[in-house]
Amino acid sequence: MSDLILEMKHITKEFTGVKALDDVNLKVKRGEIHALCGENGAGKSTLMNVLSGTYPFGTYSGDIVYNGDVAKFHKIKDSEAKGIVIIHQELALSPYLSIAENVFMGNERMNIKGVIDWTKTRSEAKEMLAKVGLENEDLNAPINSLGVGKQQLIEIAKALAKKVDLLILDEPTAALNDEESAQLLEIMLQLKKQGITCIIISHKLNEISYVADSITVIRDGKTIETLVKGVDEFTEDRIIKGMVGRELTNRYPERTDCPIGDTILEVNNWNVYHPEDPHRQMLKNVSFHVKAGEVVGLAGLMGAGRTELAMSIFGREYGQKISGEIKMHGKPIQIKSVQDAINNKIAYTSEDRKTYGLVLIDDIKRNMTMAALRHYFSKNGVVNSNDEIVAAEKYKKLINVKANSIDQTVGSLSGGNQQKVVLAKWMLTEPDVLILDEPTRGIDVGAKYEIYCAINDLAKAGKAVIVISSEMPEIIGTCDRTYVLNEGQIAGELSKEELTQEGIMKCIMQHNGKGE
């Protein structure tokens, strides 16, 4: 049997005259973990959709050779029948069905009468869950009772139940914390030992260099190179060079000529209780301030209360029994709704851009202008479409949104470009305070750099910027000052000089010590 399990030859795929893939070639060895790297919109997911039959045979040119035979997949079921299973970034689980039902969804265990055999379903589901380290989970628990990390592992169990030979994982760790990501990577290494070949798409280059045997870099729909572990340089900087076509000497652009002015936002003794449990306090006596031209970080472990703090300030979108004081430019203000927050020049970009940030079926123009529509693009309730077009074109160019036009549907954009549209949407409200919650989650290193440049431009314009990020290097690289949150309280405040990963963790550990 050939050493290659998969060879994709001269794959070209077009969408309405735009070449998403241009003569792409890919070779994957049997039993290896092969990574696909590239900027958002480079064509990685498109290539895997061609392979899996999501884009059927005949809609692309070129050949897929799988296990020595030319494959002509017309639908996903065809590729699954050959042992190819793809796990997309958006998980395909039914939230109200049980774990066991989800493991065999679309692949049900039937008896000879065509009725689901529940005994067999549960016993085999338990086997599959054991392979991904979830042997102690309640098989009858609904999927929506589990965290995202466990849901991702259940997707892998679901793939194993289909007798997978080639497993494709598209951004599997994008929404996971460090601990969950490490667990998933270890399971991939276990699958490799069992002879299963994996293709992983990820922007987390440290994870790629740890888990992958070889890396194929795609740029602008073309294959650039394949790096092999033990033969080629396998560092993050080397991968970045292939992705962006140049050395990226500084991942965090320097902020110069940006004097820090007077305090714009001040929050004092902020208390918030859980939205469903009035006795559970989520934030306790939180106080902080942000000045004009300053970028302030909110650091902390998962569940520390950073997003809850941001959402409760932004129009009381989270929590109940909220108390405390908010001042803008030294004057107390009342914020009881999102509209109040916008009126007081406060903006918030959610960590979940697809659910809370964008209308995916609408175009770029409408998404950019919707938050500012009332104040800036309408008069007496009538929208001025020309003003909308001018503003959307300006911001598309300003923050480099890669799209055919402002009439393109937002759902068709890559993750990085969707994030830029969210940023433009709130910049158009001309806020004095901009709260950015995980602004670079799930986007590539080149798009991250452009987001950091936009943050610098906001600071230079005299705005107060708050950055919430789970990536400590990002907080260190972008912020002038950082508040460390732990268990709903401020555990410490660190200046630029004091700001290190060790310093952040020290604050958290000392605060835990006080609690004990």
Image (cartoon, rainbow, N blue to C red):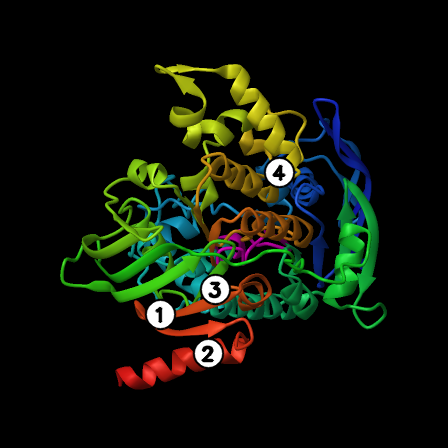
In the image, which residues are magenta? 157-176
Q: Is residue 346 magenta?
A: no
Foreground mark, 1 or 3, reads 3
Identify the residue under disc 4. 78
Identify which amino acid the numbered label 4 is placed on: Asp
Answer above or below: position of 58 versus 427: above
Please report the residue visible at 53 percent of the width from the left and 57 percent of the height from the top: 160
Identify which amino acid the numbered label 1 is placed on: Asn
Identify the residue under disc 3. 177
Pointer 2 with pointer 1, Cβ within 8 A: no
Residue 310 point in image, percent of width and height: 36, 53
Tell me the distance, in whole angstroms, between the alpha carbons under discs 3 and 2.
16 Å
Tell me the distance, in whole angstroms, between the alpha carbons under discs 2 and 4.
49 Å
Please report the residue visible at 65 percent of the width from the left and 52 percent of the height from the top: 444
Foreground mark, 2 or 4, reads 2
Answer above or below: position of 135 versus 75: below
Residue 195 can be seen, yes or no: no
Left or right of 483 in this view: 226: right
Mark 1 or mark 4, which has the lower sequence index?
4
Tell me the distance, in whole angstroms, between the alpha carbons under discs 2 and 1.
31 Å
Judge the density around disc 4: few (<14), some (14-19), many (≥20) Cα neighbours within 10 Å: some
Corner quadrant of residue 303: bottom left
Judge the density around disc 1: few (<14), some (14-19), many (≥20) Cα neighbours within 10 Å: few
Tell me the distance, in whole angstroms, between the alpha carbons under discs 1 and 3.
21 Å
Foreground mark, 3 or 2, reads 2
Q: Residue 505 carries which label?
A: 2
Mark 2 or mark 1, which has the lower sequence index?
1
Q: Does the magenta stretch include residue 165?
A: yes
Identify the residue under disc 1. 136
